[in-house]
Amino acid sequence: MTRSITNPAGLHDPTGFGYSHIVSAPGEQVFIAGQYGSDGNGHVVSEDFGDQVEQAFANLRTALAAVGLGPADVVRLGTYIVGHDQQKLEILLKHLHATWGTELPAQTLIGVASLALPGMLFEIDAVAVRGH
């Protein structure tokens, strides 16, 4: 059985907002820690939000590949945006839809005042399922 996405008729269509309401998948859960717009030394790559999101998604793909998984194995995302606004949401949506199309993971987006390191504007963590 592969992952199954459910967006119940009694709830709004969440795909335009970058997520699905429910994702089910059997198998071993794999937890990916928060990835941010960092280079190989952990330094923030740019002060630009879009650049940070792009690098964070690249880092997420690298982390998934390191354990033999890919975006299709992701069932849940946590996203954290410093100073969240509509413009930043549009940038995030572009990356979400480029990665998952309309088969989006469940997601919680949280606007925050700051993140772990100075200059960080975006962070994304994931739960993936192996063997689904």
Image (spheres, rainbow, N blue to C red):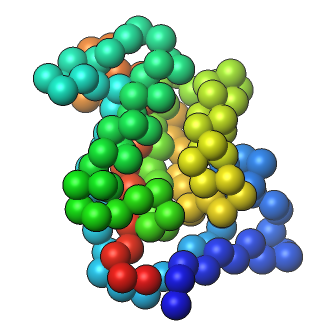
120 vs 2, left or right, is left
Q: Residue at x 45, y 50 (%)?
A: 78
On-image quarter of the C terminus: bottom left
**Rendered location of residue 44, percent (x, y):** 29, 18
Which image quadrant is residue 6 in? bottom right
**Rendered location of residue 59, percent (x, y):** 33, 38
**Rendered location of residue 91, percent (x, y):** 63, 28
Q: Residue at x 54, y 79 (%)?
A: 3
Which image quadrant is residue 32 in? bottom left
Q: Residue at x 14, y 23 (%)?
A: 41
- Decide which of 66, 11 is in the foreground and name it: 66
**Residue extending furthest toward the left:** 41
When the figure is inspected, residue 39 is found, relative to residue 58, above or below; the finding is above
Q: Residue at x 57, y 48 (%)?
A: 99
41 vs 26, left or right, is left
104 vs 79, left or right, is right
**Residue extending furthest toward the top:** 47
**Residue 24 seen in render:** no
When the figure is inspected, residue 56 is found, relative to residue 82, above or below; the finding is below
When the figure is inspected, residue 3 is found, relative to residue 96, above or below; the finding is below
- Decide which of 74, 69 is in the foreground and name it: 69
**Rendered location of residue 73, percent (x, y):** 44, 67
**Residue 43 seen in render:** yes
